[in-house]
Amino acid sequence: MKKQFKLGVIGFGATAESVLRGVVLSDLLRAKKVAAYCEEGNFSEEIDELGINVTDDCAFLVSNSEFVVLACDPHKFAETVKNFGGYVPEKVISLMPKVKKNAIKNAFGITPVKVARCITNLPCEIGSGVTGVDMTDFNKSTDDTDFITAVFDCLGNVLSVDESRMNAVTALNCDGTVYALMLVDSLVDAAVAQGLGKEEAKALVLQTLSGTCEMVARGEKTPSQLILEVSKYSGGAVQTVKTLEDGGFRKVIADAVEASVKYGKD
């Protein structure tokens, strides 16, 4: 039986709002085909203005949505399921970190449920993120895989990956934003200490990092080749590389990624 809503979102916060904003503002779905159940608090004024269906009846949303997005607190998942009123969703898109597909399926007993597990990141809020997606449960339906991909295309890029590697994906796309933010913050602070104004330093850092990432993305040269190239013409770059290597820069990054992956497994 055809459902009233194509997409029903359960959750409150930046992740849920990113999906709601993305699918409606991109015209992937009309507002009337989207519903949201708010666990606590209220959605932002921007989300209210989208014209989507907002309900405080979780069972109503689950029973009337073709795809149910779980963007709730993973620690409250079991409690949230109790609000389903016995209804079992046929198709689930999970945005909950650390909650594996089997755990979601087991919550619904013997009733078969298809689950796509997805990990977004902070830049998804502005449509410039990247989402790791395991949608192998839907491989027999190109309509379903195309739709799931389209949902996250609205938020940026999409990387299809098996769930067994999802912790590594999380360490880079989700937790990885911290590396970029700390690098920007540290470079700006260091530049200010050397006499630059904060806004001047910020502008220089952001454009330098943006331009460098664009060069790497073009794929004409590897990062290692680009490091050698800039080092040929800048003695300061040579000193930068030496200082970072002597300080264990690469090991610190590797240790941080490993710690993130380990946390995902615990």
Image (tube, rainbow, N blue to C red):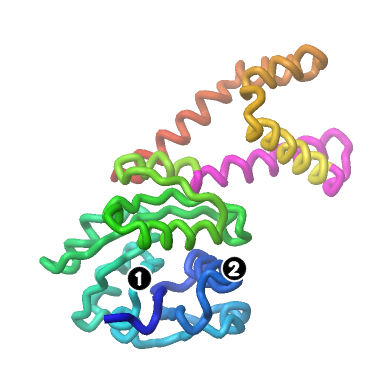
Q: Which image quadrant is residue 85 in?
A: bottom left
Task: Answer with left or right where residue 240 lies relative to residue 34.
Answer: right
Dominant secondary structure, magenta: helix
Task: Name the disc covering residue 67, or none.
Answer: 1
- Say whether marks 2 and 1 touch (CB < 8 Å): no
* x and y percentages locating residue 82 in the rendered image: 23, 77
Q: CA distance from mark 2 to mark 1?
A: 18 Å
Secondary structure found at label 1: strand
Q: Earlier in the sequence, mark 2 or mark 1?
A: 2
Q: Residue at x 25, y 70 (%)?
A: 90
* x and y percentages locating residue 184 in the rendered image: 69, 42
Secondary structure found at label 2: loop
Q: Which residues are magenta?
A: 173-200
* x and y percentages locating residue 244 in the rendered image: 64, 22
Q: In the picture shown, does residue 63 fall above or below 254?
A: below
Front one among 57 and 51: 51
Q: Tell me which amino acid carries mark 2.
A: Ser
